[in-house]
Amino acid sequence: MDDSTIAAIATPLGRGGIGMIRLSGTQALTIAKQLSSREIITPRFAHLCSWKDEQGEVIDSGILLYFPNPASYTGEDVVELQGHGSPVILHALLQRCFDLGAVPAQAGEFTRRAVEQGRMDLSQAEAVIACIDAATERAGKQAQRHLSGEFGKKIEALMDHLTGIVAHVEACLDFPEDEIPDLFLQNLQQQIQQQLLQPMQQMLKSSSFGERLFSGVNIAIVGAPNVGKSSLLNVLSGHDRAIVSDVAGTTRDVLEIDFEIQGIPVRLIDTAGMRPTHDKIEEEGVRRAKQAAKMADVVIFLADASDANSWQYDNHYDVKLMNKSDLLQDIPPEIENELLISATTGQGIDDFMAYMADYLGASDTSGEAVFVTSERHRQAIQTSEQLILEALPMLLSEEQLDLAALSLRQAWSSLGEILGIGDVEHILDRVFSEFCIGK
Ligand SMILES: Nc1nc2c(ncn2[C@@H]2O[C@H](COP(=O)(O)OP(=O)(O)OP(=O)(O)O)[C@@H](O)[C@H]2O)c(=O)[nH]1
Ligand SMILES: [Mg+2]
């Protein structure tokens, strides 16, 4: 265990109403007493006091809070100094903490200590960054569910089932061959299906939506000039962002707006209409449009339902959408199965949004309250699932039972990585390197 006392500014660097310094470790209380010249510091009591430098001159004043171990964020003694949000004052105060014996905290070190002290599991620690980084309310709520341990409990439940199953398989190993009833092993297979594989597959299904909640998606709208790409961008953004005109080739630059689809942060990208051109500026616009389409996660090909010339697009796209439905008397048979909207009247936009939500995986969450939200967790579940699937047929051949037990134990360890259980030092290093200092 690290017995150093760490200190860092926990609020964003910049001027603000309040600036906070946090200390954690065995020396935290002693340092607090020296700073504040107080003999007695009551746990969880808001002390209004001033903090002084070596000469006794006041550096800042504010609220001092002391949380004795183990009931603190890190599980160690924690002191919080809530002063004024001035970078100069905060740095002076922090330096004073260092002079009194604290050392600078590494990125994420407070939370890492919380994990090491068993105050939270690794998935909860990751939820701390997820909370901070959440770009939409729904993402924030999902992060809270992870933070509360709801996700970790699901993983723990799977690990408990695995432990039970491994125990059964290992018990079989002690029996002489031929004495293990077939039915017993078949039952075990069934349990694996129901208690492990099914819930894991459901979790994996929800992961594309869950991961997108945090990673967000870039969606590019491409198509021929004048089909209404900029009009669609304006409708979806709810304001008049892009210039719209009946002159083909209006948009030249790549334009972006941010909005959300069922909580997924979406960057919508409007591009220049694609057509052969000798106009140098428009040519550059078309080049940029192609580039944007290449980089996008989802490419929407927009066409004008009333103009068959716009229906063909040679490059790759993910979603085809027909605009200007208001101009149609009848729907031409060639496009009767396509998604139809009118950027002018708003017709079909809700259905299109529902389609996009589905496309982005919203329906795959099947009403679950908490789902997989990170690639790291998904990969650990996938590895675990793979190992269980490998073990499954081995369970029916008695001479392979030991191999089956080994695979199942590895499957358990893979799930354990999610919670930070086992030999996970390298994983901790990676996870916490993404944290900010002071958290
Ligand atoms: N009737 C009708 N007109 C539309 C609709 N959407 C766009 N328009 C009109 O079509 C013309 C072109 O619209 P834009 O949004 O500028 O088209 P664009 O695809 O961005 O065109 P470029 O930037 O030139 O590639 C404008 O006159 C719009 O008012 C629609 O749903 N119905
Ligand atoms: Mg345009």
Image: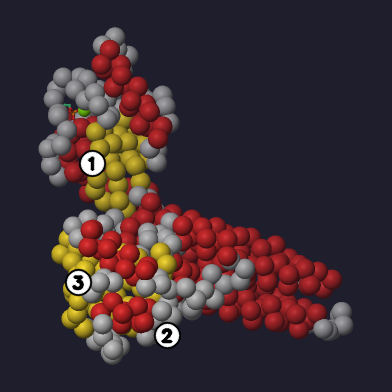
Quadrant holding the N terminus? bottom right
Residue 58 is tagged as 3
Q: Where, by quadrant of the figure, is residue 362 drawn?
A: bottom left
| Residue 141 placement: quadrant | bottom left
Amino acid type, residue under disc 1 in the picture: Ile
Instruction: Point out the tag, 2 or 1, that comes first from the N-terminus.
Output: 2
Depth check: 95 or 300 in front?
95
- In the picture of the structure, the residue carrying the numbered disc 1 is 257
Query: From the viewer's perspective, is residue 158 above or below residue 250?
Result: below
Report the residue marked by disc 2.
70
User: Is residue 136 something one can see in this rendering?
Assistant: no
Expressed as whole percent of the image width and height from the top left, the position of residue 254 reads 27, 30
SS of the residue under disc 2: loop
Q: Quadrant of the C terminus?
A: bottom left
N-term mark: 3 or 1: 3
Residue under the image location 30 percent in, 16 percent down = 283
- Image side of residue 240 versus residue 103, left or right: left
Q: Tell me: 258 left or right of 215.
A: left
* Residue type, label 2: Pro
